Image (cartoon, grey):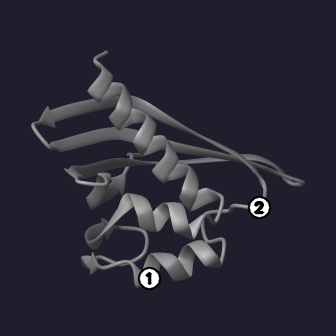
Amino acid sequence: MSNVEQEIWDFLHRHLQSVFTQDVETYRATTSEELSLYEWFITPHRQDGLDFHFFMIENSWAGSGGNFRYDLLEPRLQLYGDTAVVSYTFMLSTATDAGITHRSHNESRVLIKEDDGWKVVHVHKSPAGG
């Protein structure tokens, strides 16, 4: 793995971790203000901007505050200069008093390199199958 590829994966993990630990400042630093995304489990329409996600992160929508881990299954990185596309199956495992649960979906994120580092500019999530 090249240094740039490792930099991108490290960046992505920092970005994803910010969602589950309610770290709005890191999410803001790693996400473009012009974010566009599709999240099939929230709405069938494209969402634009950050305000919705700030609300969701601040209100623990992702199950933060508990014992969790995520895994990126079958990760792939495609690098085109200052643009990267990462795709994987995202599996989230959470432990509660009721036991351990798992949920997964397919995900791709488009990243661009700006003067202050990498930023997520687009996200697409889809069901991981039956």
What residue do we see at 44% from left, 31% from top? 73
Q: As drawn, is 63 to the left or to the right of 38?
A: right
The picture places residue 82, in percent across and down from the top left corner, at 14, 43
> Is label 1 in a helix, a strand or a loop?
helix
Callout count: 2
- Residue under numbered circle 2: 65
**Amino acid bearing label 2:** Gly
Instruction: Point out the residue furthest to the front here.
Output: 115
Q: Looking at the picture, which amino acid does disc 1 mark?
A: Phe
Q: Residue furthest top?
A: 1
Q: Nearer the viewer, residue 103 or 71?
A: 71
> Going 38% across and 46% down the picture, which residue do you hit?
129
Residue occupying image coordinates x 29% and y 27%: 5
CA gap between label 1 and label 2 equals 20 Å
Residue located beneath label 1 in the image = 52
Marks 1,2: beta carbons within 8 A: no
- SS for dot 2: loop
